[in-house]
Amino acid sequence: METKQKYVIGLDFGTDSCRALVVDAHTGAEKATGVCFYPRWKKGLYCDPQTNRYRQHPLDYIEAMTEAVHTAVKQMSAGEVSAICGLCFDTTGSTPALTDANGNPLALTPEFAEDPDAMFVLWKDHTAVNEAEQINSLIKERGLDYLMYEGGTYSSEWVWSKVLHIINTNLNIKNAAYSWVEHCDWMTGLVTGNTVPEKMYRSRCAAGHKAMWHARWGLPSAEFLAELNPQLAAFLPHLYKETHTSGVNAGQLTEEWAGRLGIPAGIAVSVGAIDAHMGAVGASIAPGVLTRIIGTSTCDIMVADAAEIGDRCIQGICGQVDGSVLPGYIGFEAGQSAFGDIYAWFKRVLAWPLQFLPDTADKQKLLDDMLVKLTDAALQSEPTEISPVALDWMNGRRTPDADQNVKGVIAGLTLGTTAPDIYRALVEATAYGSRRIADHMRAQGLRIDSVNAIGGISKKAPFVMQTLADVMNMPIRVIRSEQACALGAAMFAAVAAGVYANVSDAIRHMGSDVEAEYIPDPKRVEVYDGLYKKYLKLAGLSDEIS
């Protein structure tokens, strides 16, 4: 390893904002951070929650990235900025956009600048439920292998469903589209000057987990895609056959983007990945460690040695892909379609009458403090065998067995049930959903020795985290880094820049430590075992009760 000072940048594009993290490549010390919220998204533009449509304009990504990087480098000396040697992106996924022949999202053209279908379709957009069902039905009807490594079910949250929905419903976009691109790949191509669809570096992580790519067959065949819609088959020659793991150098930062970002030209740009997978790396993932990225939704990431897995296909999860998390290991993804979003939903329900009151500082304080007050009240009680039980399916179910048609439920209500009681039931529901994922993975032979947590809720919600530990009956360690996803991206940037030979070396030198650990309470564990069985019955899963 070189001893000369080196810095790397991890750029993390979350649901609401872009975070730029500058990291000392030798020590992992977090030198500087910049955060910028997406301006159009913040105003609610191009979204329609009633129809589950969530779209983001590519200009939001460009503008937020530029401001976030500028904010970070302003905290550094000129000499330190000149020591920046690499960068890497992580983004939400599957978050695709339809493009022109130059690889530009159609929303960047004047004709489609205000058309939501020309923008990036955010991961949580569920407008493509019917198309996902069409894809699953055709695969099963034809007896194809495409779902072997996708957990057995294709989701409306993934790229082919979303692209199919748009070309089925928007003729103008269908006629203008040349190809499609995932967000993490477009950012990499943008700053290296390589967005041409046929030449762009494509992430193994995004392709394998969301686009049914596998080394055995590449992308799905033209014949299969044409049966869904001939336009899908027309995209195929403009897509890719090969994919690349993160840490591969995808090119150098162009002079144009170096000038726009205020960092050195020619630095290495790594192949990117989906945010949760980078976050798992930032949390020092290893075989036997379940990494939970806990925020508006959750992603559960694991890795295992290929020899340990053999030919087994883990059913009901979101995918298993060779090299998607750590090159040389099989990566596994599962998760919940809503976690913190469920608490936010309940807050909106309770706050509904406040819209009729004048906007004042007191009103805003009440809104800001609502979940805090609910938590304080919930902490005054303990779970009992007659507590209300809820299902965490308000935004559908991601794992096990993806199904965006299922709905949330709250059962066991009485005239004595209070708002804090319901809030506690919702928190417990998200924990029951988490436990079911872990139980499902274990039942298929995946080894879970410990749980690491990252994400906003792991930092800000001790009540939620303690409930999670009690329900799962496992200690949960919270990783110290505030920006674990960006830290993981920075580790891959260090590999692409040649500071380390592989990401395992980068983790050893740059990994974050643990700031808190939640230990299960034996009394609550016993109560929650009984309530969890009620959760399974409510979900129609009595056969899973031992």
Image (tube, rainbow, N blue to C red):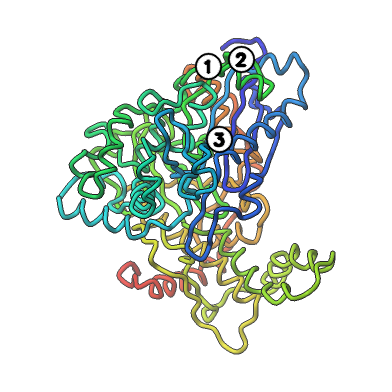
N-term-proximal mark, 2 vs 1: 1
Helix, strand or loop at label 3? It is helix
Local crowd at mark 3 within 10 Å, few (<14), some, or many (≥20)? many
Amino acid tagged 2 = Ala
Left or right: where 131 falls relative to 465: left
Instruction: Please say if 375 is above or below 476.
Output: below
Residue marked by disc 2:
265
Q: Are marks 2 and 1 in contact (CB under 8 Å)?
A: yes
N-term-proximal mark, 3 vs 2: 2
Amino acid tagged 1 = Gln
Left or right: where 360 falls relative to 490: right
Nearest to viewer (mark 3 / mark 2):
2
Quarter of the picture containing the C terminus is bottom left
Q: Is residue 285 visible?
A: no
Instruction: Please say if 380 is above or below 205.
Output: below
Q: Is residue 246 visible?
A: yes
Residue marked by disc 1:
252
Picture quadrant where residue 309 is located: top left
Q: Nearer the viewer, residue 120 or 185?
A: 120
Q: Are marks 1 and 3 in contact (CB under 8 Å)?
A: no
Helix, strand or loop at label 1? It is strand
Quarter of the picture containing the N terminus is top right
Q: Indicate the position of residue 37 as horizontal and vertical percent values.
A: 67, 44
What's the distance in space between the residues labelled 1 and 3, CA to CA?
A: 23 Å
Q: Indicate the position of residue 276 as horizontal and vertical percent values.
A: 50, 42
Local crowd at mark 1 within 10 Å, few (<14), some, or many (≥20)? many
Left or right: where 77 falls relative to 45: right
Left or right: where 526 falls relative to 44: left
What's the distance in space between the residues labelled 3 and 2, CA to CA?
A: 26 Å
Amino acid tagged 3 = Gly
| Label at residue 282 | 3
Q: Indicate the position of residue 530 as horizontal and vertical percent values.
A: 46, 73
